[in-house]
Amino acid sequence: MPGPQETFREPAVPLARFARFRTHDLDEAREAVGRIFCPHQLNTIGKAPFQARHHHVPGERVSLNYIEYGAKTQIAPGCLDQFYLVQIPVSGSAAIVNGADRYTSDAGRAAVLNPHRETTMIWEEGCKQLLLQISRRALTAHANANLGLTTDQPIAFEGALDLTSAAGTRLLRLVHLLVADAEQVRDPVLPDTGFSAPYRTPSNPSPLLTHYMENTVMTGLLEAHRHNYSGQLRRVTSSVIPGHVRRAQAYMLANLDRPLDIDEIAAYAGVSARNLQLGFKRFLSMAPMAYLRDLRLQRAHEDLLQGRRESSVTEVAERWGMTHLGRFSQYYKTRYGCTPQETLKNARARDFLS
C-alpha cells in the first residue's frame, strides 16, 4: 500500500503526449472521434462509468491511435468508406461484425475492418485498443506499385488477424516500435484532422510517420492477414522481395540507434551474410549496409529539420549510429544537396522568423 507521503499515479497509457481528449461525456466523445474517423453511433450498454480518451498521431497515409471507453460500448460506423481500420486490443476484447464476418478480437487477435462493408462492434468493459487508420486508396496503390498486385477492386480481409503467427508477431512488434518512436518526439503539436492535414508545423516539417514507415506497415498488414489477393501476393513476393530481405529491412528499422554489422543482420534474417548481400543487390540494387546508412541518414535529416537549440550535428549523427562525422557529412550532402550544418542552421533561422 502507498505510504502516507505517496500519491497515486495513474498507469501510463500509449501515446499520452498525443492526447486529443479525455471525457465522461458520450456526445463529446462521439463527435471528437468522428472528426478523425467518420460519423458513427456510439452508445453505452454496460453499467460501468463511461470515461473515454483518444490519442492520435497523424500521418499522410497511416495514422496511429489509442482509444478506450471504460464502459461496455456499442459502436456502429456503418461503412468506413475511405480507410481500413486495424484494431489491436491492449486489454479486454471486442465483438466485431464486418460484412459477413463475425469474430472476437482480443490480445491474440486483431480486427481489420474493411471500408466497403458495414461494421458494428461491441467493445467490452475495460477494452483498450491501439488502432491503425490506413487510407484505402493508399493501401491499394501500395499493393499494386510495391508488391506487384494488379487490381482496382477492394482488398477484402477475412476474419480476425492472428497476432501469434510469425507475420502477425512481426506486425505487432512494428506497431509497438512506432508507438515508442512517436513517444520520443519533442513538444508535439497536432492538427485537427488525420490524412487531410499531415503533421507539419514550423518545428516539425515532416509527418511523424515517415513514408518508409507507412510502407512497412502496409506491407506487414498485407503479409500478415488473409485477404482476397493473398494467393496472388504470395506468388508475386516470392519473385519480388524474398522473406530474408524483408526480415533484414525490419530488423534494421527496429535497431537504427545501435551498432549493427552484416553478420548480426544476416543471423536475424536467417541467411548467411553472403546470401543477404546477394539478395539486397538483386532486389534492392544496393548493399545491406548502404541501405542501413540511408535509413539512418533519413532519421538524422528529420531530426536536423526540427532545429532544436540543444541539438548539434555531432549529437544527431551519433544518435543514429554514425560516428564518423566526415563520412556522415559527405553522404548527407550527396543525398540532400547541402551539409548537415546548413540544414540545422536553416531550420533554426526558420523557427526564429516564425
Image (cartoon, helix red, strand yellow):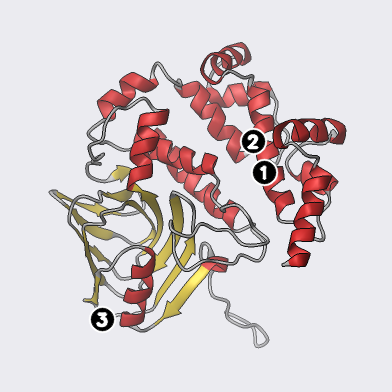
Left or right: residue 205 versus residue 333 is: left
Left or right: residue 293 versus residue 101 is: right
Residue 296 at x, y = what percent? 68, 37
Query: Could you tell me if the residues under marks 3 and 2 are in contact, i.e. CB atoms within 8 Å?
Result: no
Name the one closer to the observer, 271 or 149: 149
Q: What amino acid is labelled 1 in the image? A: Arg
Residue 344 at x, y = what percent? 79, 51
> Hey, which quadrant is residue 220 in on the image?
top left
Q: Residue at x 37, y 69 (%)?
A: 35
Outermost residue, left side: 100
Separation (CA) of disc 1 from disc 2: 6 Å
Mark carried by residue 87: none
> Hey, which quadrant is residue 148 in on the image?
top left
Q: Residue at x 35, y 30 (%)?
A: 144
Which of labels 3 and 2 is toward the front?
Answer: 2
Q: Which residue is mark 1?
A: 299
Of marks 3 and 1, which one's residue comes earlier in the chain? 3
Separation (CA) of disc 3 from disc 2: 49 Å
Mark carried by residue 47: 3
Of marks 3 and 2, which one's residue comes earlier in the chain? 3
Helix, strand or loop at label 1? It is: helix
For the N terminus, give its image quadrant. bottom right
Q: Which residue is mark 2?
A: 295
Q: Is residue 133 above or below residue 227?
A: below
Residue 251 visible at all = yes
Q: What amino acid is labelled 2 in the image? A: Leu
